[in-house]
Each structure stands twice: as C-alpha cells, then as structure tokens.
C-alpha cells in the first residue's frame, strides 16, 4: 500500500480571513503579556500630542511588543520589525501592524519613565495575588557584567594617548615646516598638507578629550581609594588599641593621578573595561535584588563601577516602593565594606535597617570534610563587640549559614536565566542613562515571564 501524505497547497487562497488567535496556543506567553499590559496604567508614555504627522502606534502595542521580544530573546529593533511580518505570535500581538525599527528604537530609548512605572505596577499586581511578599522580606543582591555596545578595541589607554599626542604634535610641526619650504618633496597623489594637518589636529583633539576624561575618573577613583584606605587604617588602629596584632601588611595610601592602562572608549565613553568570566571586556555592571520566595526582581540598577564595593546602598535604595519592609539582605564578599553595611543596618528616619548577611572574606567553593560535620553554634559575642565580630558570628551559626545559602540559589540563577535562557548578554543602547532604561526593560520582561511560568493570573488594581 503506497504511503499517504498530507496535501500541502501553497496556491489556493484562504477563503475567509484567518483569526491569528487560533494559530497561537491559548496558554502561550504572548496572551499573558498582552493581558498584563492591558492592566497597566500607561499614562507615563511619551506620545505626540500635537496631532501632526502620521497616526501613532498606541503605547500598549509598543510596550507589549518590546516586552515579548525581550522575554523571547530578540533585542535588535530591526529583528523585532522583521518578526512583526514573520512571527505568528508577534503578528498577533501587533494585530497585523508592522512598526518600523526606527519607531521601535525611539520608543525604547525615550520611555524610561513608562518602563519604570510598568516595572513597579507588575510587582503591585504580583503582591495583589499574593505571589510577591512585601513585608519583612529577604532580598538577595548581586551584580553581573553585561557587555556594552562597543568594542574594547575602540578604546585608548592613557599611556598610549599621551604617546600618540606627542607623535601627532611632531607630525603637525613637520607638515607645517614642509608647507613653508618652497622646494620640499611633494606628497602622494590626492594628499595635501592642509588636509593632513586638519586630520591630525582632529585626532589630537579627540585624544585630549579622552585624556581629560581619564584624569577626571582618576580623581574620583582616588577619592574612593582614600576612603577605603582610611577604613582599613581605622580597623588596624582599633586592633592596636585593643592590644591585638593586626594580620597582614599595613595598608599603603593610594597613588594619585591616572594610570598608564586607564582607558577611554570612543564608541561608548561611559562604558568601562571590566573583568568578566571570559577576560576583560567593555562592559557595564548591572545590579539587581530578588525577593527569595517569589524570585521576582524588586530592584534594578546599572553602574559604570567595575566592582560592587559601593553598590549595596544604591541598589537597596532603588528597591520598588511595593516592598514595605526588608528584614534581611544577602550579599557576597564583593559588596562588603564596613561603612556600607553599617549604614544599611542603621536604617533611616529612626527605623532600624535590615540585617545584612555578608561574607566578610571570599569563600571557597565546595565543602571540606570538616564543614560536613555537625557543629555547635559558637557563643554570642560579648556586649560591646565590634560590628564586624557580630556579623561574622551571624554567618557562623547554622541558621545564618542556611539563610546565606539562599543567595546563590536565588539571584545567581536569575542572572543565568537573563543571560542564557533569554539571551541578553549585550546592551543594544549606548550611554549610562540609556543602558539603565534597557536594563529596566530586561528586568520587566523577566518578571512577567516568571509570573507566566508560575501560572499567575494577574488582576486589575
């Protein structure tokens, strides 16, 4: 008996207009995002109120399109535009309209207020349906390096810039001298002395701007390093006063001024060379805080600082107002500084702050045989013990170790989902302000995708 195949007919037109909803499963992510955007207050959207020009795409369409695209790993505005033609779910979301890539990029770039408002509203919705806890919560904080939309090969170091500036000045002087000589050798065809001088002067001006920026950053870094040096010296002086011998070498005051390898990037000047898992790359440092029970992101920020040493307070300050109170904060040793942790625990307006569970030193991966053995909790610190002693005791108890272990089980998988599952490893926009807007969009898309996978049914306010 001959094999039978389904008849594939590309020529007969559809007799009735198709309903795209029938082409997408009822439990598809696109339906969830469309319903969620329909519940949001979009009054913060930037629209043209003058009434001139072509009709505008409504903010609900543009916001839903961006959220769905980022949640499913499409970040290029040109690819998003292409998907409005080729992707059934996107075509359904856009109701068979096709916003061009310029409109998509402009809406994404100019609607930071809308994205921020939507981020908080989604958390409010999660709190209403009791998915998100808002009182006495435990937050896990961390930072991750995300590539900038710029190559590290577009950067220049301070030492190389100084050498190039000297070379350019010498070449300009030679060219001007050549122009003054009546019997000087001619240049190659198509080259003229004025154009060559102008080209070198333009390059020289850009290098001067780069060195000025590097020197300004060096001053800010020196201020931070002096604060860290003063803190270390204060701890050593306290140990001396208590009759204890400090461990390690005495701290040395930092050197002032730019370093030879300090860099400036011409493509995205606000990005920095940062150490990543694959080496040193042109990056930004993206910060986030997750509520450990729901694993929803409740705080997000971006900084150009290469490390997390001063990011504890700013990241907590950026926590959504939906969170009423924070009981505990979990951070790794990269966030720890005596001043920052003390400031967080002091709180504000007479209210005590959350307890910070922070590894004071870097901890090795894996567990030794001794760590597997049952241990009795050490005695409580004596009255008047230093804050560092109290915090070290907090992590030495069984309850403290179990709570701190929640950090790597919550925030680190979130970054893994954003980078690997959603595919967001590089910013599309340039400049710290625009990058912060895009990170808000990424975290908003993550939260909605998380709620979708939890089976949440969002309700109107």
Image: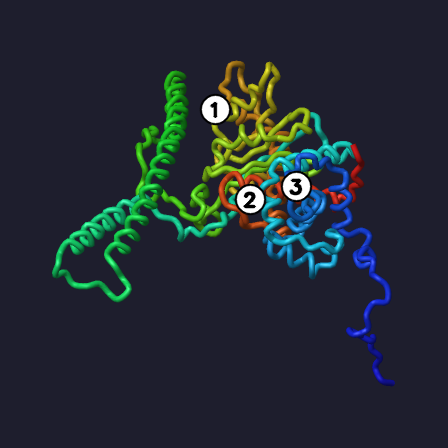
Q: In this view, does 456 lie above or below 349?
A: below
Local secondary structure at mark 2: loop
Label 2 crowd bin: few (<14), some (14–19), many (20+), radius 10 Å: few
Q: In which quarter of the image is the C terminus?
A: top right
The numbered mark at residue 339 is 1
Query: Which residue is more in the foreground, 210 or 381?
Result: 210
Residue 69 pos. (x, y %): 66, 51
| Disc 1 residue crowd, few under 14, some 14–19, many 20+, Cα 10 Å | few
In the image, residue 376 lies at what x, y percent?
Answer: 60, 28
Secondary structure found at label 3: helix
In the rendered image, the vertical position of residue 22 relative to residue 282, given as above or below: below
Query: x and y percent of residue 404 in the render?
Result: 60, 34
Circle nearer the viewer, 1 or 3? 3
| Chain-order first, disc 1 or disc 3 | 1
- State the residue at coordinates (31%, 34%): 257
Residue at 13% of width from left, 58% of height from top?
Answer: 182
Q: Which of marks 2 and 3 is nearer the N terminus?
A: 2
In percent of the image, x 66 and y 48: which residue is there? 54
Mark 2–mark 3 distance (CA, rounded to whole Å): 34 Å
In percent of width and height, residue 110 lies at 59, 41
Question: On the image, numbered disc 3 is attached to which residue?
Answer: 444
Residue topped by disc 2 = 366
Which quadrant of the figure has residue 269?
Answer: top left
């Amino acid at each position: 008996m001959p094999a039978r195949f389904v008849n594939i007919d590309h020529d007969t037109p559809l007799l009735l207009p198709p309903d795209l909803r029938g082409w997408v499963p009822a439990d598809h992510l696109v339906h969830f995002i469309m319903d969620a955007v329909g519940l949001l207050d979009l009054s913060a959207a930037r629209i043209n109120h003058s009434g001139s020009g072509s009709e505008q795409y409504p903010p609900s369409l543009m916001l839903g399109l961006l959220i769905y695209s980022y949640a499913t790993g499409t970040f290029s505005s040109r690819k998003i535009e292409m998907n409005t033609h080729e992707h059934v779910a996107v075509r359904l979301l856009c109701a068979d309209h096709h916003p061009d890539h310029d409109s998509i990029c402009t809406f994404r770039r100019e609607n930071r207020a809308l994205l921020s408002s939507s981020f908080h509203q989604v958390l409010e919705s999660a709190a209403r349906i009791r998915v998100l806890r808002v009182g006495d919560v435990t937050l896990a904080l961390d930072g991750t390096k995300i590539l900038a939309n710029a190559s590290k090969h577009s950067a220049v170091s301070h030492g190389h810039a100084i050498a190039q500036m000297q070379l350019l000045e010498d070449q300009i002087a030679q060219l001007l001298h050549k122009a003054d000589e009546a019997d000087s050798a001619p240049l190659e065809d198509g080259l003229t002395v004025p154009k060559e001088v102008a080209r070198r002067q333009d390059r020289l001006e850009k290098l001067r701007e780069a060195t000025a920026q590097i020197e300004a950053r060096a001053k800010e870094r020196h201020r931070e390093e002096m604060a860290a040096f003063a803190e270390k010296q204060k701890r050593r002086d306290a140990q001396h006063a208590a009759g204890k011998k400090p461990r390690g070498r005495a701290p040395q005051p930092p050197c002032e001024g730019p370093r030879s390898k300090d860099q400036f990037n011409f493509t995205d000047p606000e990005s920095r060379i940062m150490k990543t898992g694959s080496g040193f790359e042109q990056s930004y440092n993206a910060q986030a805080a997750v509520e450990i029970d729901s694993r929803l992101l409740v705080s997000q920020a971006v900084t150009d600082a290469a490390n997390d040493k001063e990011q504890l307070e700013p990241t907590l300050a950026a926590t959504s107002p939906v969170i009423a109170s924070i009981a505990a904060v979990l951070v790794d040793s990269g966030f720890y500084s005596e001043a920052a942790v003390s400031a967080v625990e002091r709180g504000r307006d007479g209210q005590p702050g959350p307890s910070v569970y922070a590894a004071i030193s870097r901890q090795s991966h894996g567990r030794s045989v001794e760590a597997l053995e049952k241990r009795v909790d050490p005695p409580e610190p004596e009255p008047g013990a230093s804050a560092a002693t109290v915090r070290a005791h907090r992590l030495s108890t069984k309850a403290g170790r179990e709570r701190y272990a929640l950090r790597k089980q919550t925030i680190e998988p979130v970054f893994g989902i954003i980078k690997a599952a959603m595919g967001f490893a590089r910013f599309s926009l340039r400049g710290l302000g625009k990058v912060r807007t895009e990170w808000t969009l990424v975290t908003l898309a993550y939260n909605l995708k998380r709620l979708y996978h939890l089976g949440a049914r969002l309700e109107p306010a």
